[in-house]
Amino acid sequence: MPNSVPFNLLAHNAAAWDRQALSDSPWSQPVSSDIIAAARQGQWQIHLTPSSLPTAWLGDVRGKKVLCLAAAGGQQAPVLAAAGAEVTVFDLSPEQLAKDATVARRDGLPLHIVQGDMRDLSLFADASFDLVFHPVSNQYVPDIQPVWKECFRVLRPGGALLASFFNPAVFIADRDPSYAAQGMIKPRFQVPYSDLEDLGSAELAAKREERGAMIFGHSLASQIGGQLAAGFVLAGFLEEMQPNPRFEIEKFMPSFMATRSVKL
């Protein structure tokens, strides 16, 4: 990246997700009033991965204080609020947060909506939440240990962190479409991976020109080991295939991983 060109990663990725929200990407489509009405009657589900969560991972959320971390888009947070939780939704993208605000106004839901960096939860006191819900999103920051440390800090003893993330193997392959056309997987990148450090200069310039979000592929030592290092105890793990594979490697192994970790 040319040193003469200033680059603000947070602003860049926030703007990239604002565009996703404005184009109604799959993670930016607010739930319907019917879904909210059903949640108020106790019939609801939310997602860390494409499939619904195991029931035991969430338990009864009524009256629980829940932080939906980097989880805006008008989907998970409103459903949890309708199910009886006291919900704070925290996200980098103002337009993603606007989706939650829209559902809250439409359906009369109490939602606390906060814009910010997932690595800095200093707005919240220690032991503020019973549950942190953190779906696939930490690939947008270069260092995830601050995320786990902050999640541990803001959780009460006995509270749980539900997180999902990409299998690091999905980051290793060359993305030249000619390889996929031949059914080939050509390893090119090591993990941990960084768009900013590992793409060629022309590739990085093209991605910046396209205004796509910058991505970081974290190791399992950072994803799972990082939670343990922050003080969590791993209480559940699952993995899931990508229902609509984008890369050849996703046809052969699970893309998504999810953990349930507890602060004792």
Image (spheres, rainbow, N blue to C red):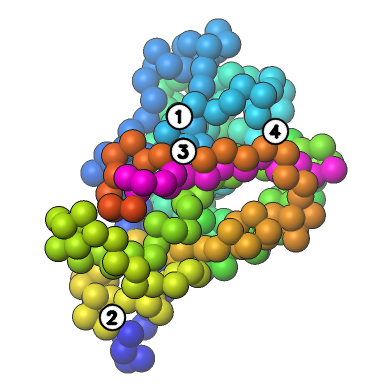
Per the image, the residue denoted by label 3 is: 240
User: Is 199 located above or below residue 129 in the figure?
Assistant: below
Q: Position of residue 203 (x, y in %)?
A: 24, 75
User: Is 61 located above or below residue 19 in the figure?
Assistant: above
Residue 244 part of the magenta-drawn span: no
Per the image, the residue denoted by label 2 is: 200
Mark closer to the observer (3, 2): 3
Asked if the residue under mark 3 is in contact with the one under mark 1, i.e. CB atoms within 8 Å, the reply is yes
Q: CA distance from mark 4 to mark 2?
A: 44 Å
Q: CA distance from mark 1 to mark 2?
A: 35 Å
In terms of depth relative to the viewer, which is nearer, 225 or 68?
Answer: 225
Left or right: residue 67 versus residue 50 is: right
Label 4: how many Cα within 10 Å (few below 14, some 14–19, many 20+): many
Per the image, the residue denoted by label 1 is: 51
Quadrant holding the C terminus: top right
* Tag 2: amino acid: Gly
Left or right: residue 206 versus residue 123 is: left
In terms of depth relative to the viewer, which is nearer, 110 or 88?
Answer: 88
Q: Position of residue 157 (x, y in %)?
A: 84, 41
